[in-house]
Image (cartoon, rainbow, N blue to C red):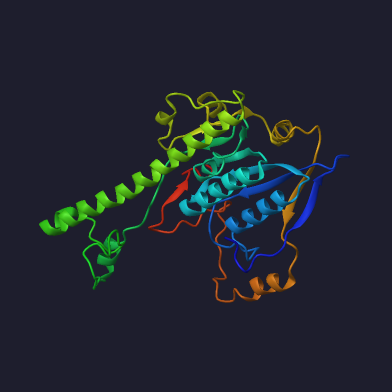
Amino acid sequence: MTTDRSRALEEVILQRTNSDNKIAIIEVEGVISSGCSDRSEMNLVDYINEQLKAAEHDSDVKAVILKVDSPGGEVLASDEINHLLVKFQDHSRKPVIASMQGMAASGGYYISAPCRWIVANELTLTGSIGVIMHGYNYRHLMDKIGIRPHVFKSGQYKDMFSGESEPDEDLLSPEDKKVRVEEDRMMQTLIDETFNKFKEVVKNGRERAARENNGHGKSLANDWQNYADGRVFSGKEALQRGFVDELGDLDTAVQRAQNLANVSSANLVAYRLPFDLGSVLSHIFGKAGTPALKVDLGVDLPRLQAGRPYFIAPMTVLH
């Protein structure tokens, strides 16, 4: 799982007590992606994996808090993080408590679902249980400037959902219309399969938490699937529907972690990548070919790739 670019992590004390016990805080902020960030050569999945391994191997770490502030992201990256959290809890027998911040929607909820306990703020935006895949059709623009595609392909579906395809069905031949219908069916089948996996993750995670919490916390409402339609809801409503266990902030999550770990106090620690001058210089001087102009819209928009499925909430821009 770990790439050869990973490095040993350094433990940082965030809050010190007189106890030898520790609670490790792992942060997930922004869009969940399998790519490397501008500040690190390690991608998010590997970084979380390394942090979980450090927490598992340290006997003083009694619990982990997953601090989530994310609208979601890539399907595969979200699923890998989900598996890491399940594996960690199975092997270490240490509880993971999700602490939802401003947003823990779609993929942000997907990675929270396997946690032993979920804490959300009353105004946290969560839910958005669903899958989205998008693309752009620029054929009309090509027609306006006189560009025509010339395609060679090995099969009739090889260029499905290409941005160059003719969007007007009235201009398609009967055979091309049949192909378009079949393309839509295949893509919807893929989306439905991924969506069913999402619902399975929610169901299994919440049912497992309910068993391990011995009746404490919340269980999914009987009609919870009626709310798994992509809608975003508040932490307060999430509690009513059984998607979270408790309302509160990070301090609430810390107290809950201590209770579940049966400790009266603990130091709060985090794991950080050590400073690497060579890595910093490589990022600075390795980007000479990138555009010098960047438009600042006041918010960092997620870089969604066409044709790739995402667990992501549509509320990424504030109005």
Would you place residue 17 above or below residue 299 in this image? Answer: above
Would you place residue 164 above or below residue 216 in this image? Answer: below
Q: Position of residue 44 (x, y in %)?
A: 59, 56
Would you place residue 222 above or below residue 82 in this image? Answer: above
Task: Answer with the quarter of the image where residue 223 lies.
Answer: top left
Left or right of 98? Residue 150 is left
Left or right of 125? Residue 253 is right
> Can residue 68 be seen?
no
Observer-nearest of 199 and 238: 199
Observer-nearest of 120 and 259: 259
Observer-nearest of 12 and 301: 12
Which residue occupies 79% across, 52% down?
A: 12
Which residue occupies 36% across, 56% down?
A: 135
Q: Position of residue 275 (x, y in %)?
A: 75, 65
Which residue occupies 61% across, 39% down?
A: 102
Left or right of 112? Residue 57 is right
Which residue occupies 59% across, 65% down?
A: 3
